[in-house]
Image (cartoon, rainbow, N blue to C red):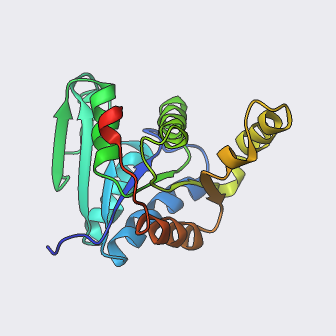
Amino acid sequence: MTRPTFSLCVYCGSRPGTDSAYEQAAIAVGQWIARQGGQLVYGGGSGGLMGTVANAALEAGARVVGIIPKALVEKEWAHRGCTELHIVDNMHDRKRMMAERADAFLALPGGIGTFEELFEVWTWRQLGYHDKPIGLLNTAGYYDGLLKFLQTAVKNQFMGDWQMGLIRHGSNLSELLAELIRHAGTSATNNMDQI
């Protein structure tokens, strides 16, 4: 297996969700990573969209790095087929290692864990702890409500437009991923040791 040209960290649900479009998007992301010669970094689970994106990437020939805390090995059924599976002590170690191993971040549909990971890596970026691009794939309008709420926060001046500009969002998978990887190549700042 050749050295990956980039590492994309994908945050997504440990459940499949109700719309088949979510699963299809996860498969497409995994396949896209492999076609572009990249590597998937994700939370190490075998269920839901997590397992779907990992399996799709593996089947298409990509390296897959899974990172999962001990407490979730059984609950999320750690994916033993990963190219690398790291079992860490806690969630902070998981998120830090995922961020360190990534050149860019992408959130697919998910629940509270996905939201927390997205908002944390977004906060780290606004604080200057990293300068890696962050994307939000709005599959089947899943994130419409969140994006509307974020604009409410901007309107009420709890956030600035510049903060919204730190994440890219869209429903076109290929365009969004290409933009993330293009900007990943120009990222210079990486102060992950401050986290």
What residue lies at 45% left-to-right and 68% top-to-bottom?
Answer: 181
The image quadrant that residue 138 belongs to is bottom right
Q: Quadrant of residue 191?
A: top left
Q: How many marks?
A: 0
Q: Is residue 137 left or right of residue 23?
A: right
**Looking at the image, which residue is at 42% across and 47% down?**
130
Q: Is residue 155 left or right of residue 54?
A: right
* Residue 43: image location, x then y, percent: 33, 41
Residue drawn 47% across the image and 72% down it: 182
Q: Position of residue 97 (x, y in %)?
A: 27, 40
Spot occupied by residue 166 in the image (x, y as percentages of width and height): 60, 51
149 w.r.t. 62: above or below? above
Tell me if residue 20 comes above or below residue 118 in the rendering.
Answer: below
Residue 7 visible in the displayed image = yes
- Front-most of 86 and 134? 134
Q: Foreground residue, 7 or 85?
A: 7
- Quarter of the image with the C terminus in it: top left
Q: Position of residue 32 (x, y in %)?
A: 42, 72
Q: State the image quarter where residue 94 is shown.
A: top left
Pick the quarter of the image with the N terminus: bottom left
Identify the residue shown where x is 39% and y is 56%: 53
